[in-house]
Structures are given as structure tokens and as C-alpha cells.
Amino acid sequence: MFKRIFIEYFKRHLTSLILIILMILIVTVLALIPAQILRIIVDDIIFNNKANLLLLFGIIYALSYLLIGVFNFLKNLLMLNTSQVFLEFLRGKMLTHIHKIKYQDMVNNDSGTFEAYFNNDTNSINELFTSGVIDMVTDLFKIFGIVISIFIYSLRFGIIILIILPLIIIVTGIIRNKMLKAQLSSKNLEGNVNKILLENVEGIKEIKTNHLSSYVKEKYMKILNNHFKANQASNFYDSFFSPLMQIIRNLVVALILIVSGINLDIFGMTIGMVISAITLISDLFTPIENLGTEIQTIQKSVAAIKRINEFFTFPSDFEKKETLLGDKINISYKNVSFSYDKEVVIKDFSLFINAGEKITFQGPSGSGKSTLMKLALGIIKPSAGEVLINNCPIYLIDNATRRKYFQIVYQEPFFSNGTIYEELTLRDFSISKEKCQEALNIVGLDYIVNLDLILNKDEYSSGELALLNIARVLVHNPKVIFLDEMNAKIDPFTASKIIKIINSFAKDKIVISINHYGDILENSKIIKLDNQINKSI
């Protein structure tokens, strides 16, 4: 999947791809020029005593390095811009996919895992552009050009370099395999680190209240240490690689000087060629040393790409289709069964709910209350049987229709840091501000008059947030209202107020609720569930 996204991106940005290739070629050619200028200075200018040209070629020599710096800067700037645009493109594709992932898969994977996909893994892929594969390709081109230049100077010396290079490649390959294993291990552990960190941040009030700092620290440090050990394994190979390359380079340079000092003609090179060859050797091993860092970056990116591909293996939810349901609604469970990991929760359950009816599921944890609600919402599919709305399977209803006909009130109201108007309308701008204000007045929040203010949850009590959630339901005027233990965490007065609002508002609507404590909905049919397998009512 990543490969397909990568190809799609560069098909759309072909100019960027051409510029990258062109920049690699320019940087490669420029890297060979200083050594050639140095050879001319020694063999032609100094040897022939052309002092009047020495200053000019000295300036040209300095300018060649200046050009190298300028084009390296332009290459890096181009890669930084390309990587950022590609990263935005990739995350957009990932965001589209995560909205399609099945509800159950989202529940079975913690938030830290998905956070690692979107942040850690995509950032590692970003490094693939900025300091990974492009730099590695550039360095490989440099190595190729340098080897050809050395062969032009001396066939014997070129053969020596060719003998050394495979040895270096073998060493690099061994380190690369070791590093890949370490990086894969590190990437797999990052999700655990993110998960426990998020848990600590989200639960900081409870941690401080119950004096659990030592406990959570011990748990966090254990996971962190495992992640640290995986990183250490990768860092060891990275640290070992660069010094090894420096030792080999210095030995080769020393060999050239010793052999040339004994017999200058042994390689068939002039003094200028020897000096130029030493420069080329330094330039040869510099990119090889860089390969150590680049290989580490690439290994991180390869591990990240594998995880991104893993992310895209999460199967998409049921294919939705446009559905016109009509004004009068009914919901029916027909011989419905459902299992979680082969554990049967609901078996052969049947129930018919007409427009204007209210149903309250009551029972202990694990009795199937939430499962029955999720089935009616269409976010999970029955293992057997059907859950229908006007004879249409609910899980097949497209999102636009679902949003129009359904509204759910959770224990924990969902707000996404938008304005009060945006939160009430869920960014459906066809809903007027006047309608929003009318809903706020009905729920008793008439003191909220500026709907353009950001809805900061910390500025409201849990009861006020619950009333805002009810105002959202009033604004959308759905055909079916789901109440998921929405009064479990609010005061009895507010809970009673909400029940009265719903009783008044939902006379012609279907209301499906879970475990209401205190006053129940008016004329609600109570369906008591137990921990046995629940069957037809």
C-alpha cells in the first residue's frame, strides 16, 4: 500500500522527481571537480612553474567547494519541501483509511498504537527523504564516479580499490541486517511507550488523588527500559560503523604514500595524480562513512514502512450505500446473534421497535446492553440474523444518512475543541445559529450567547457538558436517539432535567437507552438482560 501511495504522489508531482534526479547528478559531478583541479595545479602549474596561474586556479578550487555547498543546500531544501508535502499526502491517506476501519478493530487496538502510526512512523519516513535514501543514492553516485576517476589515473590502483569495496559492502550488509532487527524491535515497542504515556497524562488527576506516582513510574520505567535496550542495540552498530570506515580509509591513504614514496612509478601516476588520488580516497570514504548514518535512517524508515503497510491491512468497514429511509422509522432485531472472539454474547435475539417507542436495556456488565446498542447503530455487524431499519440492514446505511437519522449521547460527551456553534452542529453549516440558541435555551444554557467562542471543556461542569450534548441532539432533530448511560456521571437534578427534555422532545422518536438510574424515560419498555446468553424478548 505504501508503494502505491508513493507512486501516486510522484505521478502527481513529476516535476519534483525530475528536480531531485537532476540535483543528485549535479552534486555528484561537482564532488569530482576539486580533485581534478588539484591535479592540474600540481602537475601543470607548479611543475611547469606557471606562477601567474596559481592564484586563478586557487580561486577556482575554492569556488568549486562553494558550488558544492550551494547545490547541497538546494538539494536539502528541495528534499525538505518534498518530504513535508509527501508526509501531508501520506497522513491524509491514513486519515481516510482510519475512518473506514471496523469499529471492533479500533476497540481492540489501543490509542498509543495508532498514535505511533501517525507520528513516530510517518516521521521516520520523513527522514527517508531528508537524510536517508536520497543522500544514500547521492553518495553511491559519488562512490561510482570516484572509482572511475581512480581507474583513469591507474589501472593497478583501481583494482586495489575494487578489492577493498566488496569487503566494505559485506561489512555494511552485516551491520544493516543487525540494525534492521533492532529497529523493528524498537518500533514495535514504541506503541507501548506511547500508550502508557497517554494513560498517565489522561489519568493524572486520579494518579495524584490516589498517590499512585510510584506505581505508574515503576510501570512506565519498565516499558521504557525495554524500548531503551532495543535502541541501544541499534546504536551500538551505528557507533561501530563510522570508526571502522575511518581506520580503513587511513590505512589506504598510508599505503598510497608508502608505496609511492618507495617507487613513484609503481602505480604509473604523477605526483599530482597521487595527491589527487589521496583527495579522491578521502572523498570515497566520506560517503561510505555517511552510509552508516543513512543505513540507520533507512532501517528506521523500512521498519516504519512495514508498520504503515500493517496499518493499511486493517480491513475497511462494511461498504455503505445511499439509503432513503423515509419519515416513519422502525427498528427490528431479527434472530440476532453476536460473538466477541468466539464468546457468544447475544443469541437468537428478536425485538421490534416502532416510531415513538422507548426501549431501556438494563443489566449487569457483560450482559449485552452495549452490544445491542452498537448493533442498532450499525457500527458492528451481527454474527447471524439481521438488525434492520425500515427493512434495510443498518450497517449498510451510508454515513450521511446515519448522521441525519441517528444521534447518540455518551457518558463522556465528545467535543473537538471547535466553537460552540461547530460543536452543536457537528460542522453542518446548514443549521442556523438561531436554531442552536433555541436548543441552548430549552436545556437551560441560555446564558451562552456567543456561539463563536471555543468550547473549552474545562470551563464547564459535567452536568453542563451533558446539557450541551442534549442541545446537540435537539439541533439535529434525529429520528432515533441513543442514550449510552449518559446520566451515570452527572448529578441527579441534571439527570432528571435531561429525562424531562427527552420525554418532551422524543414523543414521535425511537429512543434506545442503557441503564438509566433514577427516573426512567416516560413509557419506556424495560428489557432486563443478565449474564446468560440473551435471547428473544
Image (cartoon, rainbow, N blue to C red):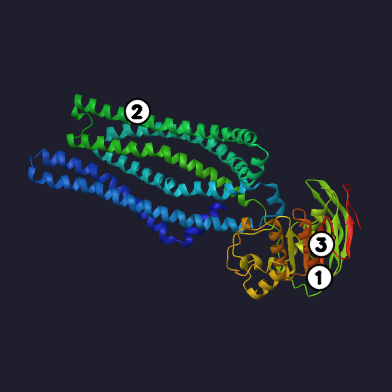
Residue 247 placed where, x, y %? 34, 28
Q: In which quarter of the image is residue 268?
A: top left
Q: In which quarter of the image is the C terminus?
A: bottom right
Mark 1: secondary structure: helix
Question: Which residue does the image show at 89% across and 47% down from the upper left?
Answer: 532
Question: Which mark's residue is nearer the viewer, 3 or 2?
Answer: 3
Mark 3 Cα-neighbour bin, 10 Å: few <14, some 14–19, many ≥20:
many
Of the residues shown, which amino acid type is indicated by label 1?
Ser
Q: 143 or 206, which is in the foreground?
A: 206
Q: Is residue 368 left or right of residue 161?
A: right
Q: Which mark is residue 247?
A: 2
Q: Which mark is residue 123?
A: none
Where residue 41 appears, as percent x and y from the top left, is: 15, 41
Sequence order check: which comes first, mark 3 or mark 1?
Answer: 1
Position of residue 414 in the picture relative to residue 395 (left or right): left
Q: Which of 36 and 335 is in front in this view?
A: 335
Q: Compute the Cα span from label 2 to label 1.
A: 84 Å
Q: How far apart are marks 3 and 1 (CA)?
A: 15 Å
Pointer 2 with pointer 1, Cβ within 8 A = no
Residue in the picture at 52% in, 44% down = 302
Q: Give the label on residue 504, or none.
A: 1
Task: Name the residue that disc number 3 marks.
Answer: 512
**What amino acid is at disc 3?**
Ile
Q: Which sits earlier in the primary sequence, circle 3 or circle 2?
A: 2
- For label 2, the crowd category at 10 Å Cα-Cα, with few meaning under 14, some 14 to 19 and many 20 or more, is few
Q: In this view, does 348 lie to the left or right of 169?
A: right
Mark 2 vs mark 1: in front:
1
Q: Indicate which label's residue lies in the foreground, 3 or 1.
A: 1
Alpha carbon distance from label 3 to label 2 = 74 Å
Residue in the foreground of this view, choosing between 77 and 281 = 77
Label 3: element kind? strand
Q: What residue type is labelled 2?
A: Ile
